[in-house]
Every structure is written in C-alpha cells, then in structure tokens.
Image (spheres, rainbow, N blue to C red):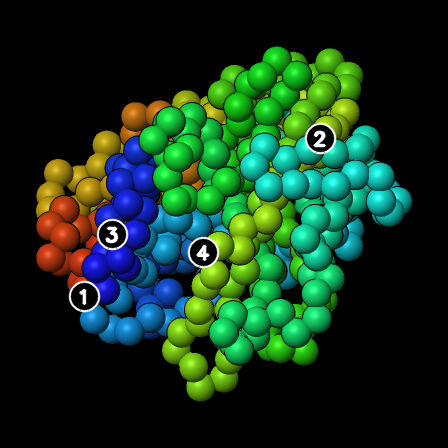
C-alpha cells in the first residue's frame, strides 16, 4: 500500500507539473468511468428545446471507495479528458478517408523503434516494429488549424497477459507539450508528440482509441486517431515536414463479470517515430462576433474556423458567478454530428472555447449552443455532478462560399 501511495502521489505531482488546465471538466469522465452514467445535475426550470451533444464513453469500473474515486480521477487526468472517443468515428475516418488526406502505404519493414528516444522512422508509408509491436501510419491530414494522424497498432505476440489476465496494447495518447524536466524523469510514460520542421511542439487537442471488446480481438489491429493544433496557424504553403511519435503500454482487457483490469507499468514500448511530409490546406476564418442572451447569460459566437475537416466555432461567455466553475459550452446535436466525436470542447483563451461543428459553413448559416455545464467549486460536492444551464443561444450569419 505504501508503494502504491507513493506512485499515486508521484503521478499526481507529474500531472500538476504537466500543466493540466483548471478548465478541464473531470466530473463527466470520472462518473462515466466509475458508474457508466453521464453525470448530470440540472436544476428545475432550466429546460430548453435544443439538446446538447455530449460524447458517450465506454464505461470502465473501479471500486466505489474514496481511493477508487481518486484513482478514477487520476486515470481520467492521465488519459486526458476530452481526448478519447468511441471507436466508430475513427473507423469511419479510416473507411472514407479525409479531404486532402495523404494516403500512407503499407510497405513492411525498413525501420525499428526502440526504448528511450526511439529511432527515426522511414519515410511515410512504412511500418515500425519493436518488441512484438507493429505501428502503421495509415493517413495524415493537415490544414492551417489542425493535423490529424490515423494509425493502427497490432500485437504480434500471442496470448499476451498480465499475471494470467488477458491484456492488449494501448497507445499512450497524452499531450507531451512543454514537459518539465521533473516530468521527464518521473514514472509517467513517454507520450504522443508532434513537431514540425521548425521544432514547434503541437498540442494534442483530440483523438480517439479502439480497444478489444473481448479476448477474441486481442491480436486484431486497432485503429486510432490523434488530432493536434499548432500554437499559431500553419501557413498553407505546399508540403511541410512533421515528426510524429507514439508509445504503447500493456493494459488488461475488461472481461465479463469483472470490475477491474490490471496494468503493467513496466510494459512501455517506444516511442515509435515517423518523419512525414504533408501538404497543408487552408482553413479560412469567418469573423462573426454575434451575441445572444438566455437564462441571464450572454454568449458570443466570435468566429468560425472553417477547417475542411474539423471546422470550429469559437464560443465566448462570462460564466455565472455561483458555486460552480469551469463552465463548458455544448453545441446543439444538429450542429455537432457524431462524425466529430473525436473532439470535445477545448479552451482557446480566457472565457472562450473551441467547439467542433458537424461540417464547414457556407452561405446563410446558423449555430446553436444548447447548454453550459459548470463543475462544483467544492471538491466535497463532486458526487452531485455538474450543473447544467440550458439555452439555447442561437447565432445566424453569412459565410462566404468555400
């Protein structure tokens, strides 16, 4: 127990040093991870016609004890709230491809990743193999606002297990931006990372992972997606160089009738590193600057970043001054389609959030914010869940032809 406590304390310190933002709304992910239910605490009289579109997660269970709740919160921090989504949107991206996507071939061999810094991968279109793990890049898409990378992980080892419990290989898809020296030397694993030819370190802002639904899928190649954003918009000027790094770890497969699965902290493999040259497409900005008020709260649609693949609405508002904090906006279901579930709202400035739209805007357009969720200020109120204020807040504007 003492060693577990020390590891937990060290992980918590590492999360703090990594700069987890205060605006991160942990409650929905914590509750869904522990109970399989979406957290909600909506006071009476705050209904609305527009339904907010929030991601669903596959529930994973931990003991319903104080330590269990802490571990759930830590696990949500470590995987990154808003990072993982259902596997189906990823499969759809793999099946249909992306506009402007670079198709990565399936040529075998030609490069090997290693522990520590890892070795540089071959040119795009190659597969990297290390310690019975095969990572293949499938597609890469880049525009001025985002870089999306789709890849598969395949386990080449039969009957992988942790102490007799069936296990699988999972990508460590955690933001690696601006890690401190203390975090670099901690027990926290190497994380997903994207840099460009200038050395710019991109933020991981979205993505999704696939997991085995049973032992029979243990060695099935799993599809994954990582979405990155630069600190400043990229210039859409032909091909640009990128370096993508990913590590994997061994985790237990959740079995029927079991409420937990083991992990293997010594199982980290990688990072696998890929060097890429990708054409960057434009992502025009539509300046809107319109305000709407509902339930005494004014919300502004500042702009729309009309990315061909991941268009974003920049929503700004002054949160209610009450016992809740970290207020997060959610779009109405018709404006945030299931194909975009790889991205949850993320903060882009003081009081402003970037929300993924169902598709690019053109001509006469309308966007609706359906609800705002606030997180309790007092940690002792965690079990009550967030407070939901329903609008709707609707914005109509004219967008130029694409």
Asked if disc 1 and disc 2 are in contact, CB closer than 8 Å, the reply is no
Q: Residues within 10 Å of mark 4 (few under 14, many from 20)?
A: few
Q: Label 1, label 3: how many angstroms apart (C-alpha)?
A: 17 Å
Task: Give the answer, above or below, for where 139 lies relative to 218.
Answer: above
Is residue 344 among the parts visible in the rendering?
no
Q: Is residue 117 left or right of residue 92?
A: left
According to the picture, the residue beneath numbered tag 1 turns out to be 66
Q: Earlier in the sequence, mark 1 or mark 3?
A: 3
Q: Which quarter shows the N terminus? A: bottom left
- Disc on res. 120: 2
Q: Position of residue 294 (x, y in %)?
A: 27, 43
| Mark earlier in primary sequence (3, 4) | 3
Mark 4 or mark 2: name the one nearer the start of the chain: 2
Residue 261: x %, y % from top left: 44, 72
Provide the residue designation for mark 3: 6
Closest to the camera, between mark 1 and mark 2, is 2
Q: CA distance from mark 1 to mark 2?
A: 44 Å
Query: Above or below — where is 221 with respect to 216?
Result: above
Q: CA distance from mark 1 to mark 4?
A: 23 Å
């Amino acid at each position: 127990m003492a060693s577990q406590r020390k590891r937990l304390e060290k992980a918590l310190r590492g999360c703090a040093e990594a700069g987890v933002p205060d605006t991160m709304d942990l409650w929905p992910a914590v509750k869904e991870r522990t109970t399989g239910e979406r957290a909600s605490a909506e006071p009476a009289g705050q209904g609305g016609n527009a339904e907010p579109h929030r991601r669903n997660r596959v529930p994973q269970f931990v003991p319903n004890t104080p330590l269990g709740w802490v571990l759930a919160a830590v696990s949500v921090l470590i995987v990154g709230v808003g990072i993982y989504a259902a596997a189906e949107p990823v499969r759809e991206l793999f099946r249909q491809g992306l506009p402007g996507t670079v198709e990565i071939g399936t040529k075998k061999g030609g490069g090997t990743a290693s522990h520590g810094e890892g070795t540089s991968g071959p040119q795009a279109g190659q597969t990297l193999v290390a310690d019975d793990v095969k990572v293949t890049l499938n597609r890469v898409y880049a525009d001025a606002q985002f870089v999306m990378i789709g890849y598969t992980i395949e386990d080449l080892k039969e009957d992988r297990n942790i102490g007799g419990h069936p296990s699988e290989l999972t990508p460590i898809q955690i933001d690696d931006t601006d890690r401190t020296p203390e975090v670099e030397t901690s027990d926290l694993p190497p994380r997903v990372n994207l840099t460009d030819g200038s050395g710019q370190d991109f933020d991981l802002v979205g993505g999704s992972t696939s997991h085995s639904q049973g032992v029979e899928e243990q060695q099935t190649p799993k599809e994954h997606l990582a979405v990155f954003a630069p600190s400043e918009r990229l210039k859409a000027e032909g091909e640009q160089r990128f370096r993508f790094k990913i590590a994997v770890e061994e985790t237990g497969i959740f079995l029927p009738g079991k409420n937990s699965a083991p992990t293997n902290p010594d199982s980290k493999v990688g990072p696998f590193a890929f060097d890429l040259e990708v054409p960057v497409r434009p992502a025009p900005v539509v300046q809107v600057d319109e305000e709407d008020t509902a339930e005494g709260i004014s919300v502004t649609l500042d702009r729309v970043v009309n990315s061909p693949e991941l268009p974003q609405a920049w929503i700004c508002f002054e949160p209610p001054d009450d016992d809740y904090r970290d207020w997060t906006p959610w779009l109405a279901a018709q404006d945030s389609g299931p194909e975009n579930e790889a991205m949850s709202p993320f903060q882009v400035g003081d009081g402003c959030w970037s929300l993924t739209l169902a598709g690019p805007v053109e001509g006469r357009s309308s966007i609706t914010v359906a609800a705002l969720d606030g997180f309790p200020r007092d940690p002792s109120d965690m079990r009550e869940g967030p407070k939901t204020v329903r609008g709707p807040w609707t914005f109509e504007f004219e967008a130029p032809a694409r």
